[in-house]
Amino acid sequence: MRKSVIKLENVWKIYKMGNVEVNALQGLNLEVKESEFVAIMGPSGSGKSTAVNMIGCLDVPSKGKILLDNHDISKLSESELAQIRGRKIGFIFQQFNLIPTLTALENVMLPMIFQGVNEEERVERATQLLELVELGDRVHHKPTELSGGQQQRVAIARALANKPEVIIADEPTGNLDSKTGTIVLDFLKKLHAKEHKTIIMVTHDANLSRVAERIEFLKDGAIVKSLNNSR
């Protein structure tokens, strides 16, 4: 039986806007197990971004529990959450979020600096990861010298820098054309099938969600339906 990696129990996130309270999440329950590929779908305003923040330890809930490897992290400080994120979770964002003044190699090396990895190992691992995403000939190129698809592959390499167990992909193909998006999606499938990574992908695209083992449908800040994809 696969162990539970991330579990959200009755998670609420309430934002105060003046005198008005906005319930971005309303009793969200979600469990993701080791080596699963889960897609989270929902319309705009359904709470997907807030859910990602909770799952990825980027924020803490107003109410409820978040269990990471069965440890409650919902009361941790920002610095404690940052350490957990750095070790455990790799992020792939729609906007790539690469630092424009750094080369592809330096962008991939960056997360390792914060985990205290020595320079020789950083260079070696970043080079290997860029070769993995078929960018071995672009290591010294800056983001402006790369296509959108190449930038997203750099972002995937960076997400893998600290050997995380969990990859969170937030609309990973949202800024790419369909052909390039397919290439990026193939990398995610490969990471799941061959590296046995746990992958949580947020998307509004039903075609993308079909690559996942399980689809969770989010509406008004809660899961309203779950669908297991047959293999």
Image (spheres, rainbow, N blue to C red):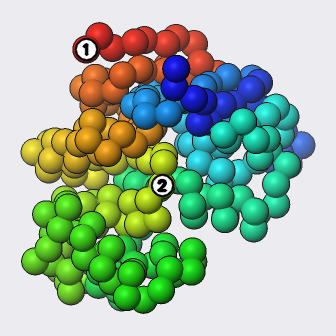
**Residue drawn at point x = 56 percent, y = 42 percent:** 52
Which of pointers 1 and 2 lies earlier in the amino acid sequence?
A: 2
Q: Quadrant of residue 22?
A: top right
In this view of the protein, can residue 100 be seen by the observer?
no
Q: Which residue is mark 1?
A: 231
Q: Which residue is mark 2?
A: 164
**Residue drawn at point x = 33 percent, y = 73 percent:** 125
Q: Is residue 77 above or below residue 215?
A: below
Q: Quadrant of residue 35?
A: top left
Locate residue 66, reporting x and y percent. Answer: 73, 37
Going by the image, does 61 lie left or right of 117? right
Cα–Cα gap, marks 1 and 2: 26 Å
Quarter containing the C terminus:
top left
**Residue drawn at point x = 53 percent, y = 53 percent:** 89
Q: Quadrant of residue 4?
A: top right
Locate residue 65, reporting x and y percent. Answer: 79, 34
